[in-house]
Structure formats: C-alpha cells, structure tokens
Amino acid sequence: RGGRVGRPVAMAISAGRATALLLLATGALGYRHLGRTPLRERARLRMQHGSSPAPRPWPSRWRAKTSADAVADLVAAGVGLEAGLMEHPRLVRGTLRNGLRYAILPNDHPSGRFEAHLELNVGSCEEGDDEQGLAHLVEHVTFMGSRKRERLFSTGSKSNAYTDFHHTVYHFHCPTADQSGRRLMPVALEALREIAFEPELLAFRIEKERKAILSELQMINTIDYRCSTMHLRELHSETPLACRFPIGRADQIAQWDATRVRAFHATHYHPDVADLYIVGDVDPAQTERLIADAFRSVRSRPRSLAALRRADRRVKPHVRHAWTQPPRAAAPAGEHPWPKVFKHDLLQSFSLTLFAKEPVRRRTEVKDMAAFLADRIIACCLARRLNKVERPNPPFIGVEFDCSDAPSEGCAVSTFIVYADAAPGRWQQAVENALRELHHVFRRGLSAAEVQAMKGAILADSRLRAQQAAGGSADQLALLMECDGLGHTFTDAAHHDAALHAAAEAIGLDALNDRARELLEHIVRYGDEDAPRAAACVVCMPSLGADGTTGDAGLEDEVVALLRKRWPADDEGPAGDVITPDRLVAEEELAARRRRLRPRFVAESVVDLAADAPPGAKGGAANPDGMGRAAPEPVLPSDLRLRRLNNGVAVTSARTRAEADAVAVRVSVPGGRSAEDPSRPGELALATATMLQGGCVAGFSREQVEMFCITHLIDLNMEVTEDCVQWDMHFPVGHDGRGLRAALELLHALLTNFSWEEDALETTRALLAAQHDARAKSLEQAALGALMEGFWAGDPRFLDLHPERFAALDLAALERAQRRCMRPDRMEVVVVGDFDEALLDDCLLEYLGTIPPAAGRRPLGPAPAPKAPRLPARYEEPVRRMRLADSEPRAIAYITGRCVSRFGTCGGAVHDNAHPLRAAVALELLTEIINSRLFSMLRDVLGLVYESSIRFHDFELLPVNGYVVTISAAPGKVDEAHAAALRVLRDLVAGRQRITEYDLPKARRAVLSHLDVHTKDLSWWLGRLQHLQAGCLPGKDARCVKDYRAVLEGITVDDLREVVSTLEVDDGKALSVIMESAPHDATNSMASRDKPSPWES
C-alpha cells in the first residue's frame, strides 16, 4: 500500500486473507496467479516478465474474427475442451525485415497516453562466468546515456529499464502529444532505437553507472533479499539460474572497462532478439508506419554472430529443470532434498519453505483454462483452510500455499511456507499444525461446498472484469508480455470470461481432488521412496551473532522428523465445509430498529461538479494531440451529494464509471492515534487490529463472515492513521444490487454486533510483537523509526506500537476505545462508484440509518479537530548516527523537518483567502521538482547514490506537516550524499537555486500524468471526497473536488516559492538520522523487546 511517510504501523489487514488472495487469483483478466509469495516478490530481481516454453511464431500480419463471435462459439451448447482460445481481436502483430517483431494493442485507458516497451532477449543467463552483472551494466549505460531520451523530458513522460534472467526491457509511458501538439510516438521510438542499437557507450557514462549499480547492490541487499536469493539458489540449484542473479557481483562490476561493455553490446543487441510492445491510445496502422520508419534502418545481425540465432533465444528456458512431478511411467529418482538452513541475527522469525517445480502449461485451449481454474480453486481453498489453522495459534506469523507460473525462470512453482515464532517448541507446533491440515486435505480431499463457493467467486470476479472497461495500458502490456513469454493466448476480457465459464463445466470434484493431491504429495509424503521429490527445502532461523551461516544438523533433523510425521486415519480434524450465511443481520432486528429510530435524511446539498469546470473536464479539450483529436482529460463524477442521517452519520456520495459495476466505500472518523490517551498509546490501533483478527459478527463465525465476503467479492481493510480511523470496502454492485446491500449489511453488523474474542487479541499481540522485532532488525525501518521519534518528540501516540505498551490493554478496554471512536455522530461515509441512486438511498437508510446513536444519546455533532502534538522548536542533536549489527555493509540516511500543512497552515496561514487546495497542489508539484533536483545532483552529477527522494506527509486533519528525504548510499558515501541532499534543500529555500519558469510546466505535466491514472481508481476518489463534511476541517469543501485542475493550472512560481519558504531545513530545524550496518564485533544488535524504545544513538 502507498501511504504516509513514517506511518508507525500499517493497520491495513484484509478482512479475510482468502478474500484478498481470491482477488489476486483472478486479476485483470483472470491470468494473475494466486497471491504474492513474499519470497518471490521481495527479491527485486526484476523477474515479472520472463519466458518459458517456446511461444508460437508471430505472423507478419494477423487479424481475427470479432470477440462477440468467439464468445458465442464458446458458450454454445456442447463446447469442446479442445476449442482454441482466440487472440485479442484488436491486437496487431508484425515483423520487420531485420527481424524486429512488434505488437500493437489500442487501449484508451488512460486516454491520451501510450506505453512503449522494447524487450531484448538478453539477460544475465547470457553472461559468462566473468561477466556476472554485465547485462545489467549495459542496460544502465545505454539507457542513461541516451540523448534522444532527453527529448521526452518535460513532456509528462516517464521512462525506466530493467534486466532479468533472460531479458532487458526499456519502457516509456508517454502522452500522445506534448503541450505544443507535437506527437511523441516518433520521439519515443527514436529514443528506443538509440538506446538499444545506437548507444554511444562513453567511458564517463560507464563509470557513472558503475558507481550507481554498486550503490544499488548495497541498497537492495536487505536480509529479505538475501533470504530470497538463497531460496532461488536452492530452488534452481541444478540450473545456471542459481548463480546468475541480474544485479551481478561487485568484484566483477568494479573491473570491466569500456571495451568489455561495448563487446557485450555488440554481441547480444540485435533486432532479431528484440520485441517491441505498444499499448495505448494509438492508431495501429499509423503506429506500424512509425515503427517501420524508426527501426528499418537498424542493421541485421552480422554473419559472424550467426551462431547466436534468434531461435536459440526464443526457446525458453535455456536451462533444464528437474521437475517435481515426473512422467507417470517413470519412478521418482534421487533423494528427497535435505533441509538447507540459513541463520542470521537479522531474521525476525522462523520459516520453513518447500518448493515444487512443474513445466508451464500453456493456455491455448479451453481445456487449459480448466486446468488453470482448477489450480486457482485449489490454491484459494488451501489458503482459506491454512488461514483458519493459523488464526487461533499464536506461534504462527503466517502460513501460505501458492502455485503460479514463474515467467523469468521458465517453470511453474508451488510454494508452501510457514512463518512462526522462533522460540523452541513454538515453531515446531506451527509446522505440525500446518502439515496436519495438508495431510487432512490429501487424505479426505476438498469438500463439494467449499469448491463450489470458491469456483463461484472466481467466476463472478471474472464476469465483473469482463463487464468493466479494459484495464489500464500498463497492466494490459504487462499481461501481453507475460502471455507471450509463457506461451499463453492473449485474449480480451469477454472472451476469457466465456472460456473460463465453459471450462468450469468440465471440472469435477474427483478430478480436482486428484490434482490437489498431486500438488501436495511432495509435502505430505516427504521421505517416502515412491513419492515425488520436492525441488527444495529451506529453513531460515534467527540466531544471535549468526551472519548468514548455513547448516545446523540438529535443526535439520527436527525439520525432517516433522515432515516425515504421519497422522492416523481417524485423526481427520475439522471439516472444510462452512455454511455461508445469506444475511448477517436478521430482518426482524432491522425492522425493530427501523421502527425505533425512523431513519431519514435530515440535511442534503447537491453540488454540480461539471458546473464552472475548466475546459475539457466534461471529456474534451481544446488542445489537439497531434492526431486530429482533442486531447482527453479526466471526467469528473456526476453530482456530488452531501447528506446527513438523523442518527448523525454524514454521507458523501458521487457516481462515476471509473470502474464499471464497482463501488468503493470509506467510513472515517477524525482523531486516529492523535486522539489516544498518551497513557494508553496504541489502544485504538490494537483494537482495530484485533477486530481484523477476529471477525465474528452477529453470532456468525469468522469463517462464515469470510465466506460471505468471498461470495460477494467484498474486500475490507481497516486502518488507523495519525489523524483518523478509516474502514475501506471495495466490491461489485452485483445483480439487483446484492453486492451493495451485502457490503453495507456487513458494515452494519461490524458496528452494532461485533464479537470480541480473547484468542484474536492474543494473536494480534503476537503479530504486532513480530512486526516490532522486524522493524528493529531492518536498517531502513529502524532508522525511520528513530527519525519519527525525533520528529514527534517521543510522543508515543505517533510511534511504533511497542509490545510493552499494549501488554496491559485488555479486551474490555479495546472494546470501549472502539465504541468511543466509532460513534455515528462522528462518522463520515463516502460512497463512490457505479451505483443506482435510488438503490443507494434504500441501503443507506436500511443499514446506516438503523445504527443506534452512542449510548442512546442524541448526536453530539462533528468530532473536534485533532490536537497538534508539541514538536521541538530546535533539535539539539540535528544529526543522529546509529549502527545496526549486520555482516553486510549498508547505509541509509533520512532528513525530516516541518512544512506547510496540506490545507495551508504551519504556525499560520499561507494565504487566508487562498483556494483551500493551493498548498496541497503546491506540495505535489514540489515533490516532482525536488525529486528531479535530488536525482540530478546526487545521482547524475556526483554519482553518490542510486536512489534519493522526498515525500510529504499526507495529514489532512492534523495542523502539522512535515517532509522526509530518503538517501540510499554506500557506507563510505552516505555522509557526502547526506550533505549534498541538505545543500539541495537549503539552496532551494534560500533562493540560491530558485524554482524557475522552466521547473513549473515540467512538474505540472508530471502531476497531470499521475492524475490520468488516478481518476480511474475508486480508492483515489475516496481520498478526494473524504473529510468534506468533517466539521474540524472547514477548509476542505466541494471546491477541492471540482477545482483541482484549475488550481493546478493556476499555481505560479511565486506560489511555489512561498510554500518552499515553509520548509524547515536549517541547522537545528531539520533532523537527520544516518544509520550504517557493521559487523557484530563493532556494534551490538538493536533488536530488543526489553526496552520501551528500541532506538539507540
């Protein structure tokens, strides 16, 4: 989640983990794999778009029949499983004579923009033993050294590049035209041609990028990254992937000269290994001509390099995997993998991971969709069951089962992982409980009821996606590249949904349970001679003083004994069936409350958001995009309705089709952690987390409520921030409005009939303690925690939750705190989405209007504004230095200070008569300007860092605000980089490097490019509409919704300079924390639960 800088603890936990996993399972078109296995996501090896078995060849020109025809074919009676999937009818493919291939997909979400990605089949697997990291260095040098790329600066374009095992990808995200009407597609294509095929590869640029990569290597080398690389080494130990991580080796990176870099480029960068993908608001025929004009002059591969022919690059993987499931006629070979133990002081918990590998099954026919759907159903059912096992067992920190394609590695990987308390006896209990549940599933199978529930939910989500508009261009392009890499047929949403529904008819319970046993057999039969062999077994264990050591015979034997344990046949455990309730609140109960409370709206105002809107806000603009069309602009929602129910609940609603048939709801109450009693800090945050760990309402169990959410595709998050409490829900409206009714009924049940449970509190305490230990062992989080402690002057309400502070809080205290907070008269409900007004009114009266006022009293009115904490006038120690025990040298620096608040105050108003959005918009523009200057000075000119950035807190209700600058640098350069960042800030504030007329248009275009994406996101609209009726924030009103573009266009350089003057950056006014890691003999580890504050200077 994106969020506040320095947020003490993220209280955004899914109402049902299975719900979140389900939504991830289906994705934009149903191709997204279940969940996000932490090990594979944290590695940061840029492996999201890879390749696998040889894809079908691209025809030079290809056209298909319409999607409607294909859907009709698939849904016809008696559709065969052998029926082929139809490629997206709007997709255009082609190949130039020099071998470069291209794919063009028109997509106007967002309108007026396009994505251009050039993928070369050159990655770390093409490197020699003495070239580890050379592909990555060439990527840096070619990209950063491009002069033609600079022509896209100040146009609202974004660009980047990455390298994985098999690919190097350069990508641009651009508007179709700049402010003058100049078309940017030719500019982007020329830049891509120069980057890939005509780079200068100058010696000074090579030196700059060498420094940047060495800094990047240290920045990403967190303990999570080290664990991830170890897991991948074990998973692919039989392949070269185990020793070809794209980041490379520091000792080799430091040695290569310009000749070596140029030789690698000359050998591997040729058009017959290049694929160009363009997705966006483009005309395919015109784009094909532009591609030909830009790339036809690129010379084909020289005959001297003919041995490196394209076919070899296209057949993926380049490596031979050892599959977990061998051919059925063959007997398993080899020993079961012995656990590989990794021990380190910075690990925060025990983990056991078992991997399995299978060939990727290409999805080209309906029967392949049936296999895909079966795996998704199994994974979701197992996730729900394991989540149920985990919840009442505090030894668990988490337990997951995931099966998904690994594109860059050329295989399908299933992952079973248990995270647990590392204390003796605790991790053993957690592993045993998780394995026991898998044994039950293996022996008895999944039940018909749970399979049907998961299948129905996945199909309903697929149907919802098909009804909505196409996904964003970036998502569509990523999906297209992934499908091409894996050999899947890339379809449109409607065709995919029809195929998935047709495939669902072929999935029987017996066959599905046979597949479930296949996926689990390497786990539950570990050690059996005739059982499939797991690909790898890895154990991570915290150990005081350990610095990455491997091996522990005693621990290995304990793990093997647990894996080989078998449970008797009569030990069947709990059944998997859960009865899903049709309703959470009885009709009789609602009827009684309607009679007693007589719900009605007592106040209402309507704001026409289109009235007086700037040109183009209704869907067009006067500025052409260079292709004869009006440049599109975001369309505002329709009328904004501000109402209040007679029980005090304020309701703000606006209709928009940003997401068709979808609605987002936010319930917010001012105060948040700032309203906590300083003697009981964390009370409200702990109460919210306990609600999420519990989930029992109206006499229904958590599992039943979870299935209710899954059935209606409701995603619920609860969060406690520094200045408010907010509950978010996202869901489809559903047939006859069932989804909207179900979501508001769930909200009613949570507010009126929630059951507080001791085991939920115990689990929450254990999880928060584990999070606390994890932060103390993280260089970045420990330093940021120290920075926030200084910024907030040690006020415990704004700091991380410490186990000692909430140990004394009991369930009764948490319930009282929650009830004091979530009072109807303090509550503001924001509803935005594609709903029917009459239906919404009925649901609001039925479910929100029947919430009783607090303690039966009349509404007391809006909540008071959160009080500003006392912040230090000066920092007596403006630079604090810290050390963290670690075997690897790393460093981080942060700078913070106060600045103007988002609604114009920081010790006084910027302008009493200014537009309420003025300061907030100015801060967005300043973020772009300062980040650009930090990058130019620290990265490009001085070569000190790989990454540096500034962010402003997003408090709205607190009358204080601040900024945080992050500087990632090598230990030997962090002091110099910190000093340079301070100079950038001080020169800006002092006027030595003032904001100019050149800076403003560039920043404005960048903000507008973000706006094009945000307006398609209902969650973004929730933030825009939140607090419009908060009496403690009178400055935020309907103008903040309708006037955003006008304010953005009207901001002047003088306005920005005035806001810049509020940044406190002088010595004593700004606080810095510089933290470096050092070996154990140089410093002591700071991970401790024994002190109220874990931060030591």
Image: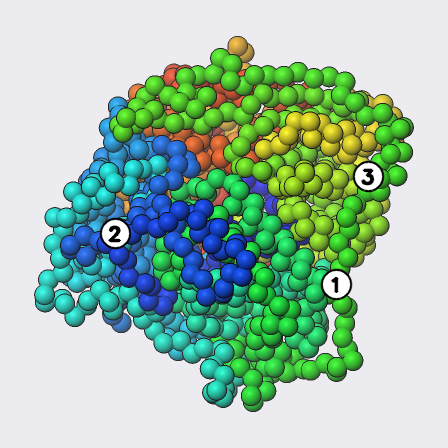
Type of amino acid under label 2: Arg
In front of the other: 909 or 687: 687
Q: Position of residue 652 (x, y in %)?
A: 65, 25
Distance in Å between CA atoms under marks 3 and 1: 27 Å
Q: Residue at x 52, y 34 (%)?
A: 658
Location of mark 1 (residue): 577
Distance in Å between CA atoms under marks 2 and 1: 51 Å
Which tag, 3 or 1, sits closer to the chain's start? 1
Mark 3 or 1: in front is 1
Q: Residue at x 47, y 54 (%)?
A: 73
In front of the other: 1092 or 223: 223
In front of the other: 217 or 755: 755
Distance in Å between CA atoms under marks 3 and 2: 61 Å
Which tag, 3 or 2, sits closer to the chain's start? 2
Q: Which of the 4 image quarters holds residue 991?
A: top left
Is label 3 in a helix, a strand or a loop?
Answer: helix
The mark found on residue 752 in the picture is: 3
Type of amino acid under label 1: Asp
The number of callouts visible is 3
Answer above or below: position of 877 versus 830: below
Q: How crowded is the residue under tag 2: few (<14 C-alpha within 10 Å), some, or many (20+)?
A: few
Q: How crowded is the residue under tag 1: few (<14 C-alpha within 10 Å), some, or many (20+)?
A: some
> Can residue 709 be seen?
yes
> Can residue 686 be seen?
no
Location of mark 2 (residue): 61
Is label 1 in a helix, a strand or a loop?
Answer: loop
Residue at the top extreme of this rendering: 913
Q: Position of residue 1065 (x, y in %)?
A: 44, 30
Is label 2 in a helix, a strand or a loop?
Answer: loop
Answer above or below: position of 728 versus 891: above
